[in-house]
Amino acid sequence: REKPVAISYKNHSGTAYFSCGFVGIPDIDYYFVFLCFIYILSFVGNTAVMTILFLDNRLRSPKYIAVFNLAFVDLLSSSALVPKVLDIFLFNHRYISYNDCLTFMFFCFTLISMQALNLVALSYDRLIAILYPLHYHVKVTHKRMLCLIAFFWLFAITSTLTAVGFLTRLSFCRSVVINSYFCDHGPMFRLACNDITPNVVIAGILPILILWFPLFFIVASYSSIGYALSKMSTVRERMKAFKTCTGHLSLVAIYFLPIVLVYAFGSKIHPNARIINLSLSTVIPPMLNPIIYVLQTQEIKESLKKLLKISEQSKIAMKT
C-alpha cells in the first residue's frame, strides 16, 4: 500500500492537510472490508431497535428511552466514523483538510463520550429498579430520564467543543503524519509548534470525566446491586433480579474492557495492535448492542415477533 505523505502546515488558519494511515499492517484491506460488514450490521440493527421502540407503545418506559438513545448514538457513531475511515484508508484518500479533521474529531469524540454516558443512565435505571423496586416509578420517571440524557448530551458536546476549541489556538509549522485511524486529539496537539500546556491539561481531564467517572459509577452501582441481591431470601429471586442486569453488563464489558486493556498495557502493546484494538472498540459495541438487547430483553423480543407477524400477515393479505 502507498505510504502516507506528510504535508507541511502553514498555521491553524491556513490550508493544511493531515495524512493518516494504518502503517505496516499486512493485508489491511481485508480489515476494512470487515469494518464495512460491521457498519452494515450496526446500521440495520440499531435502526431496527429504534423502529421497534418507536412503534410499540408498550415500550415507552424510562428505561427504553435510554435504550432508544443508545441505539441512536450507536447509529450516529458508526455513520460518523466507519464511512470516513473507509474513504481514507480503503480508497486511499489520506488527505484531510484542517477544518474537516476538526469536524471529524468533534463528532467522533462527542458520540464516543455519549456511549459511555448512556451506559451510566442505564446503570442508574437498574440501580433504582433493584434497590428501590417499590419507588421505581417515582424515582425513575420519563421526565427525569429525558433530563438526564439531555444533560449528558450537553456535557459531551461542551467537553468536546472545549478540546477542539483549544486546538484552534495551535500552529503547525512542520510536516506531520498522525498514525491513527481518525483525527485523534492527542496525536494532533503533540505536533504543534507553540505551547501545548492547556491541551495537555484537557487531555488529562477529559478521559476522567467521560470514561473513568462513568466506569466508577457503574462499578459502584453494581457493587450496591450485588449487595442487595445477596440479601434476597431465595436463589430464584436473586437470579430473576440479576437477569434484568445481564444485558447492560454485557454492554459495559464490550465497551470498557478494550479501553481499559489499552490504558493498562499501552506501553507494551505494538502501535499497530493498539490502533486495531481501539478501532474495534469503537465499532464493535454499536454492532453488538442491538443484538444483545433483542436477545436478552423479553419485551423487545415479543415486540419484534409481533411486528414480524403483522408484516407476514400483510404480505399474505396482499397476495390474496
Image (spheres, rainbow, N blue to C red):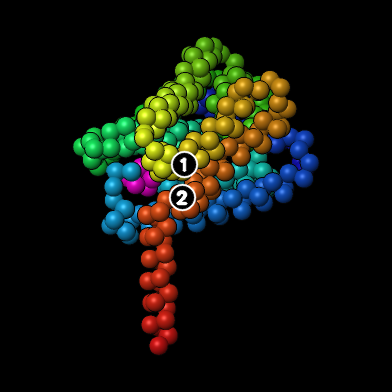
As drawn, the residue found furthest toward the front would be: 234
Q: What x and y, as percent, mark residue 74?
A: 47, 44
Q: Quadrant of residue 127?
A: top left
Q: Residue at x 59, y 50 (%)?
A: 38
Q: Magenta stretch mostly in which secondary structure?
A: helix
Q: Label 2 is placed on what type of residue? A: Gln
Q: Quadrant of residue 217?
A: top left
Picture layout, residue 297 above or below residue 128 = below
How many other residues sit within 10 Å of disc 2, few (<14), some (14-19) or many (≥20)? some
In what quadrant of the picture does the C terminus appear? bottom left
Q: Looking at the rendered structure, which numbered label has been put on residue 246?
A: 1
Whether residue 48 is visible to the viewer of this picture, yes or no, is yes
Does 265 lie within the magenta span?
no
Q: What x and y, as percent, mark residue 284?
A: 57, 43
Residue placed most toward the observer, 188 or 132 = 132
Q: CA distance from mark 1 to mark 2?
A: 8 Å
- The secondary element bearing badge 2 is classed as helix
109 left or right of 191 in image: left
Q: What x and y, as percent, mark residue 260?
A: 57, 27
Numbered range of the magenta stretch? 64-69
**Residue under circle 2?**
296
Whether residue 144 is visible to the viewer of this picture, yes or no, is no
Q: Residue at x 49, y 48 (%)?
A: 292
Q: Residue at x 53, y 42 (%)?
A: 285
Residue placed most toward the observer, 300 or 22 = 300
Q: Label 1 is placed on what type of residue? A: Thr
123 left or right of 89 in image: left
Picture layout, residue 203 above or below residue 240 = above
